[in-house]
Amino acid sequence: MKKDVIIIGAGAAGLMCAIEAGKRSRSVIVLEHAEKSGKKILVSGGGRCNFTNINLHYDNYLSRNPHFCKSALSRFTPHDFIAMVEKHGIRYYEKEMGQLFCRGSSNEIVNMLKKECSKAGVEIWLNCKISGIKREDCFTLSTNYGVLESESLVVATGGLSYPKLGATDIGHRIARQFGIKITSLKPALVPFTFNAKDLKIFQEISGVSVDAEVNCDNNHFRGYILFTHRGLSGPAILQISSYWNEGDPIIINLLPGLDAYELFRTKQNSRMEMHNLLSGYLPKRFVREWCELYMESKPLNQYNDKELRKIAHHIHNWTIRPNGTEGYKKAEVTLGGVNTDELSSRTMESKKIPGLYFIGEVIDVTGQLGGYNLQWAWASGYAAGQYA
Ligand SMILES: Cc1cc2nc3c(=O)[nH]c(=O)nc-3n(C[C@H](O)[C@H](O)[C@H](O)COP(=O)(O)OP(=O)(O)OC[C@H]3O[C@@H](n4cnc5c(N)ncnc54)[C@H](O)[C@@H]3O)c2cc1C
């Protein structure tokens, strides 16, 4: 069987690309090895799919070439995706900081994409296993459904994170097969792990979250950090994990927007216990453990100025050293991917191999937390869909 376009991967980018190519009257087939389409979309945003972010800026993306994402993102914006969502009557809301979520469930987004695919005449083949790819006059794919040929081949197989949802390294293998470079890969938007000694405090207060500012290597994020049985998670931690390299310390400001020393000074003559004062600003369970570990809690009038300065400094610069991350098993995304130098930023086509396209997370473009990764998938899929 011969098609104009074969897309590997029925995820966010693959389905968007299929819709656009189909609208151009290209014959399109999407090959998906899982038993259903869009499995990551379904679990995204805790089942409500944070499908875009209306405050999107190019700075929200990490890539060796920070300019690469601009062209596609400017040609398919959050408002373009919102228009599609509204056309399908999907109700949504802004949770915070421009993050848009479905009021119902992520299923509505997957159904919308499937409906648009069928309207555009796109076929989706599930449970399809690809065993080989060749390129002579056209692309030839060997699959469990037989041999398929196409003029254009679009690789939309995502990153390595969440293998239980169907992630594989096939996209990176295809790139290597065609001599296309891959940047180094690592799990991102991922919780941190710690050695047994440090982990003890986190386990004692597992389930507690603190609104903090988290810093690493000149990058900082404000948001909740969550203590868990395995280490540290929560939005601010996931964000900073994308900028963390092995051995880097993480510096946490536990009272952002407040001057702890000034706060202590106003109570310097009081008999109030330090932990009681701090509990007015931080969760009680956290304060108890933290004070036990790092200082002697006593009435405020018993500290001298030097001690108060030291505690204040520690509160604003709590330094922790993760010993690793929870890896691809728990990472929302993969940092790195197909080197953007290899692709046209306008079409996502390989510069070396005409007709071969890469879209979505398989490329070295990684969004921060907050709907940016799906927006990249939609936008890069849309871009390739105009040309494949
Ligand atoms: C738990 C979780 C929550 C997330 N929440 C959000 C969120 O709320 N907002 C946001 O913006 N981003 C979120 N993300 C990230 C976002 O889901 C991804 O960045 C996005 O789905 C990437 O789109 P993609 O099309 O490139 O890849 P995917 O959506 O992963 O699609 C790739 C497809 O390729 C298929 N595939 C893989 N290997 C093969 C193979 N060998 N043969 C055939 N098919 C194959 C896969 O089964 C999959 O269907 C979340 C990720 C996770 C893991």
Image: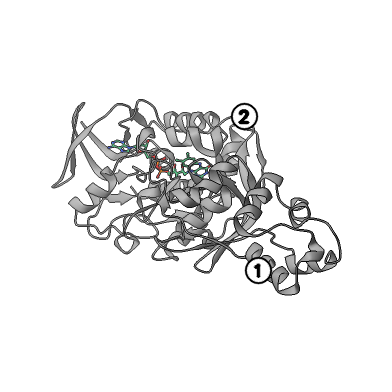
Can residue 233 be seen from the camera position used here?
no
Quadrant containing the N terminus is top left
Q: Where is residue 71 in the image (x, y as percent from the top left)?
A: 46, 60
Residue 9 lies left or right of residue 103; in this view the side is left
Residue 204 lies left or right of residue 14; in this view the side is right
Toward the viewer: 321 or 156?
A: 321
List the single residue furthest toward the left.
136
Residue to which mark 2 is pinned: 104
Q: How crowded is mark 1: few (under 14 residues within 10 Å), some or many (20 or more)?
A: some
Q: Which amino acid does label 1 sit on?
A: His
Q: Which amino acid does label 2 sit on?
A: Gly
Q: Marks 1 and 2: in contact by CB < 8 Å?
A: no
Q: Earlier in the sequence, mark 2 or mark 1?
A: 2
- The residue shown at (30%, 40%) is 168
- The residue shown at (69%, 66%) is 312
Give the number of the mark in front: 2 or 1.
1
List the single residue furthest toward the bottom.
306
Q: Where is residue 181 in the image (x, y as percent from the top left)?
A: 25, 59
Q: Position of residue 68 (x, y in %)?
A: 42, 62
Q: Is residue 140 above or below residue 340?
A: above
State the SS at label 2: loop
State the SS at label 1: helix
Toward the viewer: 269 or 26?
A: 269
Distance of mark 2 from mark 1, alpha carbons?
Answer: 45 Å
Toward the viewer: 163 or 387?
A: 163
Q: Which mark is residue 313?
A: 1
- The residue shown at (62%, 29%) is 104
Residue 285 lies left or right of residue 24; in this view the side is right
